[in-house]
Image (tube, rainbow, N blue to C red):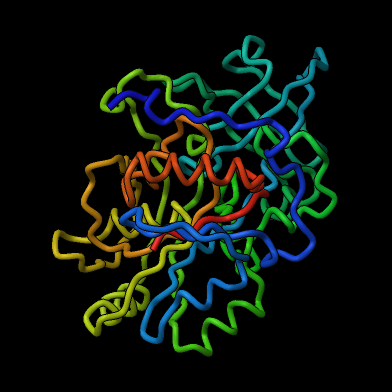
Amino acid sequence: MKTSDFFYDLPPELIAQTPIQNRSASRLLVCARDGSSIKDTVFSSLVDYLQKGDVLVRNTTRVLPARLFGKREGSGGSMEFLLLKRLDGDNWEALVRPGRRAKTGLKFHVSDELSITILGSTQSGERIVRLAYDGVFEEILDRVGQMPLPPYITQRLDDSERYQTVYAQEAGSAAAPTAGLHFTQELLEEIHKKGVEIVDVLLHVGLGTFRPVSAKLLEDHHMHSEYYEVNEAAANAINNARKNGGRVFAVGTTSCRVLESVADKGGIINPQAGWTDIFITPGYQFKAVDALITNFHLPESTLLMLVSALSSREDMLNAYRHAVREKYRFFSFGDAMLIV
């Protein structure tokens, strides 16, 4: 298939710039997997589509305040760093700006507590950097780092916790698993009381998630890799639910990619940790996920291709056209979709 097959027109004013006050008051577009129906509702009504015995699988990653600004040792020139993923020890893969000035060997001071040295470059143009710091790394980042909002969000975020899910735990992501931003503790308690088990997995989200596909053909696109973990308790809960007729609802494309990465051909979830570069496109046969809660994604993105695989390209583009007509809010701080 061609990348251009996944293009749609989006008026810029529909790109949500700020989160709404009540997370679960966002809108929800419910789409049948077979394309037979679409329905406009609100996110809090998600509980009505879940049944006793189902499992809700969520990604508990937490976004690092990984946007850093440094001054070059000696000259004082400015450099912006965005930490993407830890490689080993204190070595990270990072985006830098301006890239032409990011020469190997240069050292930049972010604060009295933190400095960054450029070690080299990756094949795709990112930099390998080494961090040197005095103290607890996460605490230093909280003091000197900024939240790495996507480039299509141009307004200031007053409360950085609004770019975290209410259940975020382990820091390591360069971007939020945004489908989870709609959940409140109250809604999660209501879902639990209905007899739905809530299961935690982990995938640290990389910025490759948001990058447009540059290849003209899908088969020529190289998917980025992201670190994941599925523990034994999570695997057992999901396997038991499916064995007893329950459905698996994945919260977001990140949870979906984790489950499809660790499931065997029979749909059995195996506890494991590692890196996944799974690229899900139309024609893919899902092994573990029955329903998906997701936001509205960028044109020609790998995420739009994934949701099109769960339904169909034609049905998804039709649903997106409906969302544009009805003035849904798009992207990270926007409204949500349930494909079931």
Residue 305, by quadrant, is top left
Q: Residue at x 67, y 51 (%)?
A: 137
For this view, does 153 lie left or right of residue 291? right
Residue 116, by quadrant, is top right
Q: Name the residue nearer the viewer: 315 or 273.
A: 315
Number of labels in the image equals 0
Q: Which residue is drawn at 48% across and 62% down?
A: 251
Can residue 91 be seen in this snapshot? no
Image location (x, y in percent) of residue 105? 60, 17
Image location (x, y in percent) of residue 335? 62, 53
Q: Name the residue nearer the viewer: 242 or 44.
A: 44
Q: Name the residue nearer the viewer: 111 or 228.
A: 228
For this view, does 127 lie left or right of residue 280? right
Q: Name the residue nearer the viewer: 27 or 116.
A: 27
Position of residue 11 relative to residue 321, above or below, is above
Residue 271, by quadrant, is bottom left
Image location (x, y in percent) of residue 153? 72, 37
The image quadrant where one finds the N terminus is: top left
Q: Which residue is drawn at 34% across and 46% down?
A: 276
Q: Which residue is drawn at 32% across and 62% down?
A: 289
The image quadrant where one finds the C terminus is: bottom left
Can residue 61 be seen in this snapshot? yes
Position of residue 61 relative to residue 309, above or below, is below
Position of residue 180 relative to residue 77, above or below, is below
> Residue placed farthest to the left in the image?
265
> Residue placed farthest to the top in the image?
100
Image location (x, y in percent) of residue 262? 27, 58
